[in-house]
Image (cartoon, rainbow, N blue to C red):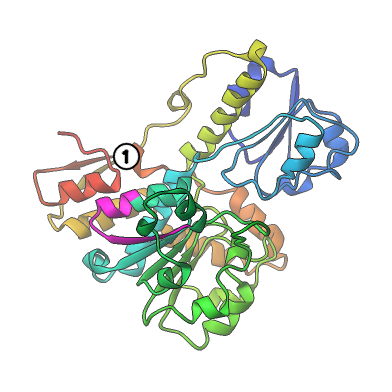
Amino acid sequence: MRILADENIPGVEAYFGDIATAISYAPGRAINTAQVAACDLLLVRSVTPVNASLLQQHRPQFIGSATIGIDHIDVECLAKQQIPFAHAPGCNADAVGDYVLAALLYVHADAPQRLADKTVSVIGAGNVGGRLVKRLRALGITVRVCDPPRAEQTPEAEAFVTLADAMQADVVCVHTPLTGEGAHPTRQLISDSMLSLLPQNAVLLNAGRGAVVSAGALERFLPQRPDVQVVLDVWEPEPDIPRILLPQVRLATGHIAGYSLEGKWRGTQMLRAALNRVYPEYDRPLPDMATFLPPAPRIVVLDDDPWQALYDSVEAVYDIAQDDRRFRLAMRAEEPARAFDQYRKTYVQRREIQQCRVLVQESPARPLLRAAGFQIPS
């Protein structure tokens, strides 16, 4: 089987090498019709539009996207051509949760314990948002959930709030997929009218899809509301982002919220599992991805203050400020769009909190660290 993969997908040899006659790699934005015509199995990430134009010369036996979202995939086209397709929902959900926790602690770095008194709205409660809700509530934080499609499908609709109510929280985290049709489209969901509802000193964080939050609305809003702190990992558009926003954004990163080492490898593993279901003749036991990864770090905590210990431990695993500095430096380049992709291609091997052990003596910090997801040896 001839395999063509986005060069940013790790573990292709580990999980597909046994069935491959050849494996070739290409930059995701550069994958073209001629390359697809020479492959049997196509593996992409979010930057490769998979549509009728890309597939006009050839129909691969299987297409996989090692991502949560599928707004870059013309699912109807694949169904019409009877091309088996799979993606990796939830593969990096924990990594995005780590990103959010690191960001919220960073913007409250002068007094991390203040985060416990905030009300956080999570807009979109799917694989990412749903896990984030559970983690924040485990930390004792009050959480509102806005997800109209789920509210319509659950008998506990009172557990959800409207978008207008969600926007009036101290912290607003956006984790919806990008959709332009249906009963609840999300493109440009957060526009001028919604931004105007943010209370004083609010935090707005988008680690979902860039176009869910209107870049134009942010450009109009932020000069009038310098009290609002904005964290952006996704942008409208990408990779040619509106650099005018950079000086006004508290934390800026380049679509790497889910870029943990575990999250990337998990996505590849999930695609191989999906291929096995489609083609049982290729089925085999899948190796544990831990066999391919270096040991996760161990952290020693000396501070008895629970929230300061949490801040220090999260920063030891993931220094989000460093990502912000690297991104701002990259965006000074003469060709920022190319620099955006290079920033992602050369991203460091970030680990997930749930894989990390914290060595801490008996102290009030232990329950909070465990609630955040750290392994706490007894």
Which residue shows up at 57% across the image and 24% down it? 273
Q: Quadrant of residue 236?
A: bottom right
Three-letter residue code for mark 1 = Cys
Instruction: In this rendered view, identify the residue nearer to me: 195 or 373.
Output: 195
* Foreground pick, 126 / 352: 126
**Where is 314 relative to 77, above or below?**
below
Q: Is residue 80 above or below residue 246?
A: above
* Numbered disc 1: secondary structure: loop
Q: Which residue is mark 1?
A: 356
Residue 229 on image: x %, y %? 43, 75
Q: How many marks?
A: 1
Query: Residue 38 at x, y = what percent?
Result: 85, 29
Q: Position of residue 277 (x, y in %)?
A: 61, 20
Report the quarter where the N terminus lies. Answer: top right
Quarter of the image containing the C terminus? top left
The structure residue drawn at horizontal position 65% and vertical position 43%, both measured from the top left corner, is: 45
Give yes or no for residue 146 being in the magenta stretch.
Answer: yes
Q: In the image as oriented, which residue stretches furthest toward the front?
A: 155
Q: Is residue 350 visible?
A: no
Magenta residues span 134-147
